[in-house]
Image (cartoon, helix red, strand yellow):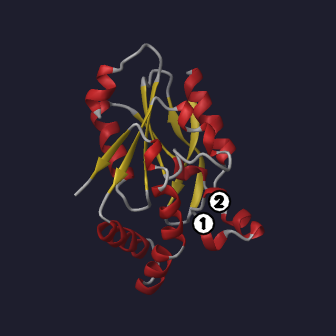
Amino acid sequence: MAAYLTETATPRRRILGIAGEPGAGKSTIARDLATQLGAALLPMDGYHLPQVRLVELGRRDRMGAPDTFDVDGFVGTLRELRVGGTVHAPSFDRETEEAVGDSIVIPPEAETVIVEGNYLLLDSGGWGEVAALLDAVFFVEVDHGIRLSRLIARHEHFGKTPDEARAWSLGPDEANARLIRATAARADHVIRLP
């Protein structure tokens, strides 16, 4: 990926997307790549709707689905990144499961921004604008069993019981994974992990 960015260098800010199913490892890849390149990092998770809003909408039991995010806010941030200047964005606190407003600051001198998230390639529900705002999107694929094990472990780490973690991973997360998996064909490149 680093070679791809070097070969396609242009004077304008480059925005690279890393998409994949929950537990595929996209956050780790994005973080490592951003460190290696000295790039800014923008995770899509900061655009989760607040818990209280999800309850009001009756969507809390499927948090992580496409309609549980502020897609307009996310698209707006990507547009700001295209313009340049300082861009403020929210991060996501996994312990409270809430977004933390304006906790990410991307300075004007950031020539490369790595954006990672589930729905970068989705073409419905307002998400269709995202891919056009990215210079390239990599889709991360990993063995289903490995991905599921990682996902369950992550849910347990952040407070779910083993039974709750497995139920959430096989329920809402798997429903989202099927939707995300279907978007892989729209990626510029696929990264297959062992």
**As drawn, is 64 to the left or to the right of 189?**
right
Residue in the image at 59% along x and 62% along y: 65
Give the Cα separation between the discs numbered 1 and 2: 6 Å
Number of callouts = 2
Q: Residue at x 53, y 53 (%)?
A: 45
- Crowd around label 2: few <14 · some 14–19 · many ≥20 (10 Å): some
Q: Quadrant of the N terminus?
A: top left
- Whether residue 134 is visible to the viewer of this picture, yes or no, is yes
User: Residue drawn 33% across and 26% down?
Assistant: 5
Amino acid of disc 2: Thr
Task: Report crowding for label 1: few under 14, some 14 to 19, many 20 or more residues within 10 A (C-alpha).
Answer: many
Q: Is residue 86 something one can see in this rendering? A: no
- From the top left corner, tell me how far across and down residue 32 is, in percent: 30, 43
Q: Is residue 192 left or right of residue 15?
A: left
Considering the numbered disc 1 on the image, is that residue within a helix, a strand or a loop?
Answer: loop
> The C terminus appears in which quarter of the rendering?
bottom left
Judged from the image, the secondary structure of the residue bearing numbered disc 2 is helix
Q: Which residue is mark 1?
A: 63
Q: Quadrant of residue 162?
A: bottom left
Among the 4 quarters of the image, the one containing residue 158? bottom left
Image location (x, y in percent) of residue 50: 67, 60
Name the residue that disc number 2 marks. Answer: 68
Left or right side of 190 for 115: right
